[in-house]
Every structure is written in C-alpha cells, then in structure tokens.
C-alpha cells in the first residue's frame, strides 16, 4: 500500500520530528540538580589552649640554671610557657577572670624590676616551609606599652613577621602573617608574644591563634 502524504500530513510529520528533536537535543530547565558545594571547613588551630583558659600551672624558667637571670613566678595557662629566663627582670604570671575578651579566663603578665630584655610567652609549634600562616592575639596593658608577635625558628634563630604594636588599657587585636623557609619537617619554632616593658607594666593576653592560610 502506498502512503501518500498530503501537504498537511507532511507538515504534521515535520512537526512531530521537530518536537522529538527538541525533546532529545535541547537542554531543559526543571528541577535543578544540586551541584556539590565546596564546604569551607575552617583550618584547625595550631596552638593549644588558644583562649588561655584554666587550668594554669606553675610558671618556671626554662633556661640553663647557670644562665637564668629573670625571676619567673606565678601561674601560666596550660600549653604555654615562659621564655624570659635570660632577661634581667621579674615576671609574675596569673589568672585573670574578670576583664576577659574570650572564654572565662586569660593570661595576666605583671612585669617589674626592669633591667634589660623582654618577657616572652611561648608555645612551640611545627610549621611547613613555604606555607602561609596567620598569627593573631588580643592584648591590653595597664598603660601605654608595646608588644610584639612573632614566630621564631628555634634551630636557626630566624624570626618571622615581627610586628611591634602599641597596646593600651582597651583590648585590641594584633595580627601578622608569615611564610617560613627551611627544609621539610622544619622549622620547629615558637609562637611568641613579646612584651617590652620600660617600666612596671601589667599585660593581659587572650585569644591567641595561629592558622595555616587557605591556598
Ligand atoms: Ca580566654
């Protein structure tokens, strides 16, 4: 049997083919499929007890007994230690629970008998050469004073990203970034909060953090 298509029939067949091609080939809207979204997980903090919370422990000098010049007293937040033994001064660490900017406690640092040197609050941390790191801290003092944040490689004595800033009786945030050099596995170094008193001064430190920056 021969099928003869009249003009209307030809149009109908073309219409059907066109609709079929449109359905098959043209992308359509509809319910959007969920694209996997990159969840931005904050990097883990590299310092222990970043908020300088209790428990505190007895502060003590860490240098060789024959080279200790400083008098180091009081209580220091767990995970932190003093590194001022070489300085000619007295430093008394204590727990502050009243004027705190993060959590329930912070580190109080009283200095007196200032001869020379500086007070260094330290925590040891291992970093990866070539990576970028951010250090930050919140600090205040009993009067106008200066503190410094830095990372020091304990093996080479190289210091990174030293930043001396004035502090006052109000809490302020200090932040620095650095990229260490060295071979893999080093440097082993310390995050330091350095106070440089020229007269009897009390410092308070809280919320000290160190992060590896996102690439
Ligand atoms: Ca705290």
Image (cartoon, rainbow, N blue to C red):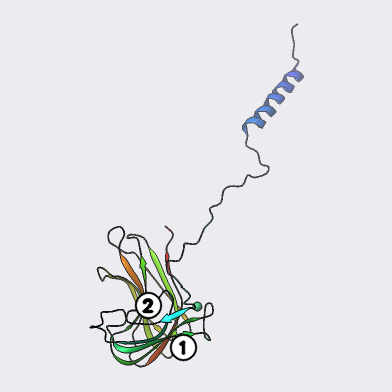
**Helix, strand or loop under label 2:** strand
Residue 207 in the image, given as x and y percentages of width and height:
47, 75
Residue 197 in the image, given as x and y percentages of width and height:
34, 88
User: In the figure, 43 relative to 196: above or below?
Assistant: above
Residue that appears at 74% across and 14% down: 5
Of the pair 196 and 60, the residue shown nearer to us: 60
Tell me if label 1 and label 2 are in contact, CB under 8 Å.
no
Q: How crowded is mark 1: few (under 14 residues within 10 Å), some or many (20 or more)?
A: some
Q: Does the closest atom of ligand 1 sit within 8 Å of the Cβ of label 1?
A: no
Residue 192 in the image, given as x and y percentages of width and height:
36, 75
The alpha-carbon separation of the residues under discs 1 and 2 comes to 24 Å
Q: Is residue 215 left or right of residue 89?
A: right
Residue that appears at 27% across and 59% down: 183
User: In the figure, 179 relative to 55: above or below?
Assistant: above
Reading the image, the residue beneath label 2 is 81
Label tally: 2
Of the pair 50 and 179, the residue shown nearer to us: 50
User: In the figure, 24 relative to 153: above or below?
Assistant: above
Task: For the N terminus, give its image quadrant.
Answer: top right
Of the pair 206 and 73, the residue shown nearer to us: 73
The quadrant holding residue 59 is bottom left
Reading the image, the residue beneath label 1 is 169
Earlier sequence position, callout 1 versus callout 2: 2
Give the label, 1 or 2, closer to the camera: 2
Q: Residue 146 carries which label?
A: none
Q: As drawn, which residue projects farthest toward the left?
A: 66
Task: For the C terminus, give its image quadrant.
Answer: bottom left
């Amino acid at each position: 049997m021969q099928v003869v298509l009249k003009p209307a029939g030809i149009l109908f067949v073309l219409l059907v083919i066109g609709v079929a091609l449109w359905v098959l080939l043209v992308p359509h809207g509809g319910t959007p499929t969920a694209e996997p979204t990159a969840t931005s997980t904050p990097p883990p903090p590299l310092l222990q007890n970043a908020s300088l919370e209790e428990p505190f422990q007895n502060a003590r000098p860490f240098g060789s007994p024959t080279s200790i010049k400083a008098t180091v007293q009081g209580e220091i937040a767990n995970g932190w230690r003093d590194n001022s033994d070489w300085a000619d001064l007295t430093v008394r660490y204590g727990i502050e629970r009243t004027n705190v900017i993060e959590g329930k406690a912070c580190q109080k640092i009283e200095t007196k008998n200032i001869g020379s040197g500086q007070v260094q609050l330290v925590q040891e941390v291992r970093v990866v050469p070539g990576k970028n790191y951010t250090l930050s801290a919140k600090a205040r003092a009993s009067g106008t004073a200066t503190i410094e944040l830095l990372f020091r490689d304990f093996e080479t004595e190289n210091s990174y990203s030293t930043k001396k800033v004035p502090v006052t009786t109000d809490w302020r945030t200090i932040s620095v970034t650095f990229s260490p050099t060295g071979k893999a596995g080093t440097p082993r170094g310390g995050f330091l909060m350095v106070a440089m008193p020229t007269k009897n001064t009390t410092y308070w430190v809280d919320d000290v953090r160190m992060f590896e920056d996102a690439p």
